[in-house]
Amino acid sequence: MNISFIGAGSMAEAIIAGLIEKNIAERKNILVTNREDQTKLADLKKKYGIQPTYQMEELMEDTDMVIFAVKPKDAAAALKKIKPYLKEDTLFVSVMAGISLSYMENRLNVQQPIARAMPNTSASVGKSATAIAFNDSVSKHQKQLATTVFSSIGVTTVIEENKLDAITALSGSGPAYIYYVVEAMERSAAEIGLDADTAKKMILQTLVGAAEMLLTSGKEAAELRRDVTSPGGTTEAGIEVLQKENVQTAFMKCVKAAMEQSKKLGGMHESKQIV
């Protein structure tokens, strides 16, 4: 498989690392470019053995897939630059939040095979939860290619585009919610007299163990919670405080607010307020 990256930031690097680790693409068949940071391209070449280039013809010539990983504010200019070189049967995959399929179709070609993927930052450790949506021009083979690529950095789910704002709020922003909880647990650990190293070790293993239980036990989260919560016990005392403080409701509001912001940002792009 030949893959070209436009943009060389952390998400592009995470995908490159996954492709190489899972032997999905050979190093010589991975090309990458960015706007002007030659040092970053040189670092990627040294680290992964991939091929940096600023020649659009070379980048697009034999590629099966273009992964578009620029900042949303740079999208319009980048799309305009690459349009003359992008072949009509090449799969174009955007990993930008808020840039719709129709926006890209209007700036490239209505018949261009285009996908939107929404990985999260856990891609850097091969544990991303990625959702991907396709336009009508993407072939079955191309859908398989895209799913294979993003499965190299975690779990991939194909969805309808109108669900991407919800996915952005849930799993795109989701790692930050978990980190926020860990921050609170670390602060509470300090207040009850635990040293930072011990607290961190216990908290992280607790998270790993809980995630593994959710993945493998076959039980719902509510059931697992009840299994831990003995009447009159320590867990019940803690849960009662969370319920009293409406923590679950606050998290639900958090996800909904993130979804509304994703919709708002997408609307701004569509109206050309951010280009």
Image (cartoon, helix red, strand yellow):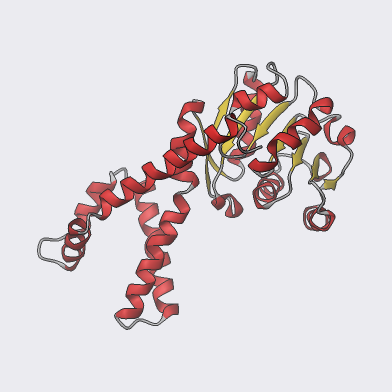
Residue 50 in the image, given as x and y percentages of width and height? 81, 48
Q: Is residue 202 above or below residue 146?
A: below
Q: Where is residue 101, by image quadrant?
A: top right
Residue at 73%, 49% in the rendered image:
8
Query: Residue lying farthest front?
Result: 273
Q: Is residue 57 left or right of residue 108?
A: right
Residue 84 visible in the snapshot? yes
Q: Quadrant of the N terminus?
A: top right
Residue at 70%, 41% in the rendered image:
74
Residue 232 or 265: which is nearer the viewer? 265
Residue 215 in the image, given as x and y percentages of width and height? 39, 47
Q: Is residue 140 above or below residue 31?
A: above
Q: Is residue 28 above or below residue 38?
A: above
Residue 242 in the image, given as x and y percentages of width and height? 22, 59
Residue 51 in the image, given as x and y percentages of width and height? 85, 46
Q: Is residue 158 left or right of residue 231?
A: right
Residue at 64%, 48% in the rendered image:
11
Q: Where is residue 218, by image quadrant?
A: top left
Query: Residue lying farthest left?
Result: 232
